[in-house]
Image (tube, rainbow, N blue to C red):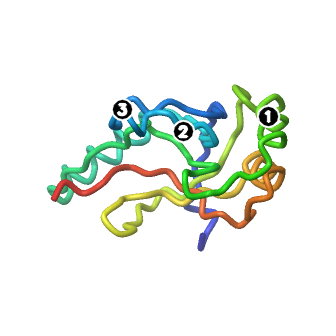
Amino acid sequence: MNSMNHVAKCRGKIIFSPNRPGLKKSHRSFDNGVILKVDNGITEYYSWWLNRKFGISISKPAWGTHITIVNDRDRVKDFAAFEVAKKKFNNKIASVGYDVRLKKQWQFWVLEVLPSPELVEIRKSLGLREDYPFHITIGRDDV
């Protein structure tokens, strides 16, 4: 991120093995995933703003507003470590900073997130890369 002048803060709940009710039945559970569930108002505001300012309509994320800590492409190999991290962090509250300037990645609108100690520690404890590009997905272009 270029400047701390464009950083806002939010808090959320760390959720291990989250359900994804907005997805097809076969993809609803994400056993080795971890997210930070944050206020849906973030997505609501930016969705409204994109539509109002630019006439862009987007589909909201299936999980609601969240920050992915461990995604389905990460290969968690140490399931014992996953259970240890789950006991330590599941349902805990974490604070993060995010850049308020929207960016477009492929067909998705996102806000970059500063790595917080909790998010990095979870990834490190699972043997995953610590320089993961954390972000809040606002939505996908409705094309």
Label 2 packing within 10 angstroms: few (<14), some (14-19), many (20+)? some
Residue under pointer 2: 30
Which of these two is toward me, 104 or 72? Answer: 72
Question: How many numbered circles does the render carry?
Answer: 3
In this rendering, is residue 80 above or below 3? above
Would you name the residue on which mark 1 appears? Answer: 83
Q: Under tag 3, what secondary structure?
A: helix
Name the residue rendered at 83%, 32% in the picture. 88
Q: In which quadrant will I find the C terminus?
A: bottom left
Alpha-carbon distance for marks 3 and 1? Answer: 25 Å
Residue type highlighted by circle 1: Glu
The residue lying at 69 percent from left, 40 percent from top is 95
**Label 1: few (<14), some or many (≥20) within 10 Å?**
some
In front: 122, or 58? Answer: 122
The spot of residue 107 in percent (x, y) is 30, 64
Give the label on residue 52, or none. none
Q: Please provide percent x and percent y for residue 132.
A: 65, 63
Q: Mark 3 points at which residue?
A: 25
**Mark 3 nearby-residue class (10 Å; few <14, some 14–19, many ≥20):** few
Residue 103 vertical placement versus 92 (above, below): below
Mark positioned earlier in the residue sequence (2 or 1): 2
Badge 1 marks a residue whose secondary structure is helix
* Residue type indicated by callout 3: Lys
Q: Which residue is more in the foreground, 133 or 16?
A: 16
Q: Distance between the residues labelled 2 and 1?
A: 14 Å
Left or right position of 67 against 62: right
